Amino acid sequence: MSDKQKFAFDKVNFILLAIGMGIVIIGFLLMTGPTSSETVFEPDIFSVRRIKVAPVVCLFGFLSMIYAVLRKPKTQKTEE
């Protein structure tokens, strides 16, 4: 049994997983911003970027990570 047959993922799976994780991190960074306190109200907490865009980016990242996990690596035929 060769070393490549021992792993469930190949190099492409790991790259896709890293890209998906990067997209999720970008989505969480888009959600950050100033906060409201008891004395000061910050209307930016209801901005389109924080309410609509960032969750969609995170969802896309999670879906791409799921695809990376479920993707079946291509097997190479070897001559014996």
Image (cartoon, rainbow, N blue to C red):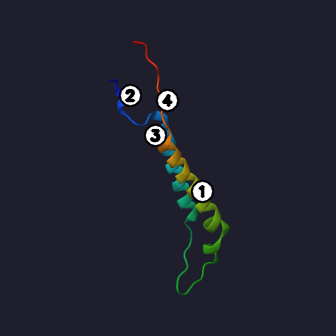
Question: Tag 4: residue type?
Answer: Lys
Question: Tag 1: residue type?
Answer: Val
Residue 30 coordinates in the image, percent (x, y): 58, 61
Q: Is residue 30 above or below residue 8?
A: below
Callout 1: few (<14), some (14-19), or many (20+) C-alpha neighbours within 10 Å? some
Q: In 3D space, how far apart are the residues under numbered discs 1 and 4 (Cα atoms)? A: 29 Å
Please give the name of the residue rendered at 40% of the width and 36% of the height, measured from the top-left corner: 8
Question: Tag 2: residue type?
Answer: Lys
Location of mark 1 (residue): 57
Location of mark 3 (residue): 14
- Name the residue nearer the viewer: 77 or 53: 77
Q: Earlier in the sequence, mark 1 or mark 2?
A: 2
Location of mark 4 (residue): 74
Q: Is residue 65 above or below residue 59?
A: above
Callout 3: few (<14), some (14-19), or many (20+) C-alpha neighbours within 10 Å? some
Res 43 → quadrant:
bottom right
The tag on residue 3 is none
Please give the name of the residue rendered at 64% of the width and 61% of the height, measured from the top-left corner: 53
Q: Earlier in the sequence, mark 1 or mark 3?
A: 3
State the SS at label 4: loop
Q: Earlier in the sequence, mark 1 or mark 4?
A: 1
Please give the name of the residue rendered at 48% of the width and 38% of the height, measured from the top-left corner: 13
State the SS at label 3: helix
Outermost residue, top side: 80
